[in-house]
Amino acid sequence: MKKTFRIVKIFQVAFSLLIVLLFLGSVYYAFNSFDTQIKAAIIAASVAFGVAITSHFVQKKRELEFKIRERKVEAYQKIFDFMMYFLQASASSAPTEEATGKLVAYIYEINYALIMWGSSDVIIKWADFQVALKNHFPIADEAETLARVFFYKKQTS
């Protein structure tokens, strides 16, 4: 099966190369029959057309990169909001169900945002953070784990 696939690929590449060479040869012979001024005009028009198409694709690429950057900033903003909420929650005296539920909601929002838009390094660090939480407080309920972690300081003092 693999051998047949390789042979088919080789023939496809060879056939494509043959078609490209035939096309370039016909363009060369047609181009040589033109007057010098027509050749210069065709070259200038081709260059202008190539520059216009290239600049269009570069602009589209920049727009796409900017949109992706905006989404990444939103995802990282969620992490920052989570950390600020963590600082605020750790100052409270005892975990409430509302606070614990909000922590769980933050975790799920961050997970979704990072999977969609986070860089690989951030995703790895976030996963390490979650594993460290679960290893430090080995209990089944995620909400209780979060409550213990984020209210740990107040409970032990």
Image (cartoon, rainbow, N blue to C red):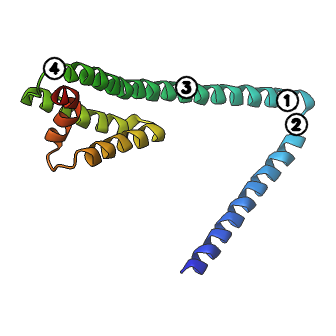
* Residue at the image position 11 percent from the left and 28 percent from the top: 95
Q: Secondary structure at mark 1?
A: helix
Q: Residues within 10 Å of mark 4 (few under 14, many from 20)?
A: some
Mark 3 or mark 2, which is nearer the start of the sequence?
A: 2
* Residue at the image position 24 percent from the left and 22 percent from the top: 85
Q: Residues within 10 Å of mark 2 (few under 14, many from 20)?
A: few
Q: CA distance from mark 3 to mark 4?
A: 45 Å
Q: Amino acid at mark 4?
A: Ser
Circles 3 and 4, Cβ within 8 Å, touching? The answer is no
Mark 4 or mark 1, which is nearer the start of the sequence?
A: 1
Q: Which mark is residue 34?
A: 2
Circles 4 and 2, Cβ within 8 Å, touching? The answer is no
Circles 1 and 2, Cβ within 8 Å, touching? The answer is yes
Q: x, y percentage for residue 118?
A: 41, 35
Q: Which residue is mark 4?
A: 92
Q: Which mark is residue 62?
A: 3
Q: x, y percentage for residue 51?
A: 70, 27
Q: Residues within 10 Å of mark 1 (few under 14, many from 20)?
A: few
Q: Amino acid at mark 2?
A: Phe
Mark 4 or mark 3, which is nearer the start of the sequence?
A: 3
Q: x, y percentage for residue 18?
A: 74, 62
Q: Amino acid at mark 3?
A: Arg
Q: CA distance from mark 3 to mark 1?
A: 36 Å
